[in-house]
Image (cartoon, rainbow, N blue to C red):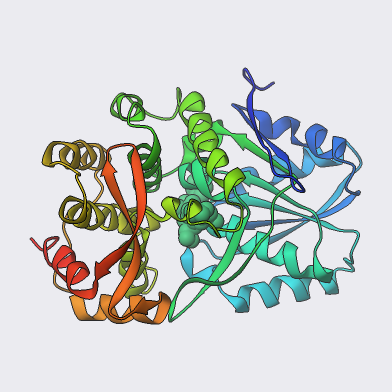
Amino acid sequence: MSSNKISAKINLKDNAYEVIVSKGILNDCGNYISNLEIGNRCAIISDSNVAPLYASKVSESLANKNIKSELIVVDAGESSKSLESVEKICRKMIKTGHDRHVFVIALGGGVIGDLAGLVASVFYRGVPFIQIPTTIVSQVDSAVGGKTGVNTPEGKNLIGSFYHPKIVITDTLTLSSLPEREFNEGFAEVIKHAAIRDKSMFEDIMSVEGYENLDELILKNVETKARIVEQDEKELSGLRAHLNYGHTIGHAIETAGRYGKFLHGEAISLGLIAANKISSQKSNLSDSENEIIIKALKKFNLPTQLDNSVSTQSLIDIMKSDKKFKNGKIRFVILNKLGEAELSEDVSEDDISLAIEALRP
Ligand code: NAD
Ligand code: GLY
């Protein structure tokens, strides 16, 4: 049995879908999936940590609804987010006899969601896709909004697509098995949502104790992201870019660590602090507002300093290969104040270098 179910709708013209949040809903996922009428064969894509914990629950619930599933497991970790993994998975699916009538389930964190979403979008030119997120990052952010992607040595998420799931089934009981570091890193994205849109969320953030009472906060984050994605689905108007607050520098830090030194949220924590510094110079973000963000990051033991093993120049070089600098300036998301973001065209390479240097111990 699952606990009280709460849900949100992502209202996109051609791709509306529901996000359902509940403890224990994994046992019922077959019901929700069978109601979508998207077929009776699927590939469950998961990773080596998540599959042993939760894949049998999903496949049994599907079997109860006469849906046959095959499990495909990749190594846990960011290094699996590669084109090589996409090819391996697609070929495995072809060899298993899957064709355009299959659908794909992503069972895992943001790595699996981004990877499986890309697989679903290219397999036989696109088959239906379902997200079952099992980390904070994926439940509050990556499972919603339809961005899929893989990394290359040059940068993060440089190859990908917009491809929305048919439903997002979020079982917050899965958070009980998340290691502490992985649990904590997820709050970087929650803090980002609070910083760009909803400063009242900082109160909720500061009172988090474990995973048991997170359902409402997770749904609040889904709704925050949904309202942005609904207005700028393909990141064309600049509004959706607000969700990249802290990510320009954060992604470069993640890439420089070769997707191993920092977890995603840890790199974003540093990116947020650097972006705050730039916001205080280019706009009105005050020291006290910056402190509120830093206090929240510290609550989750997220890093606030960057050691010298990564040089500032190497981060700038990564940003240059990943992002467009025009006349030495880059489009950069800044905060005017807590809860209010905007895109600036006035951030230079020097501004970024100084903000990175300010992260040094
Ligand atoms: P992740 O998927 O690597 O999961 C973190 C770790 O936790 C992994 O080792 C995983 O095996 C393990 N794990 C997952 N669920 C577990 C559970 N319930 N119990 C025990 N262990 C579990 O990383 P993540 O932090 O979830 O996601 C980060 C990724 O998400 C990055 O690649 C980032 O770029 C991407 N992302 C994408 C978007 C988007 O909009 N598409 C948004 C934010 C982040
Ligand atoms: N995580 C940024 C976005 O979905 O646009």
Is the N terminus in the top left, top right, bottom left or bottom right quadrant? Answer: top right
Q: Position of residue 19 (x, y in %)?
A: 65, 35
Q: Position of residue 182 (x, y in %)?
A: 39, 48
- Residue 39 visible in the snapshot: yes
- Residue 262 visible in the snapshot: no
Locate residue 228 relative to residue 94 in the image: left or right.
Answer: left
Question: Quick check: 346 above or below 103?
Answer: below
Residue lying at the far left in this picture: please name it.
361
Question: Quick check: 38 above or below 120?
Answer: above
- Residue at 55% across / 38% down in the picture? 227
Locate residue 318 relative to residue 57 in the image: left or right.
Answer: left
Q: Nearer the viewer, residue 214 or 228?
A: 228
Question: Quick check: 230 above or below 85?
Answer: above
Is the C terminus in the top left, top right, bottom left or bottom right quadrant? Answer: bottom left
Q: Nearer the viewer, residue 136 or 241?
A: 241
Question: Quick check: 326 above or below 24?
Answer: below
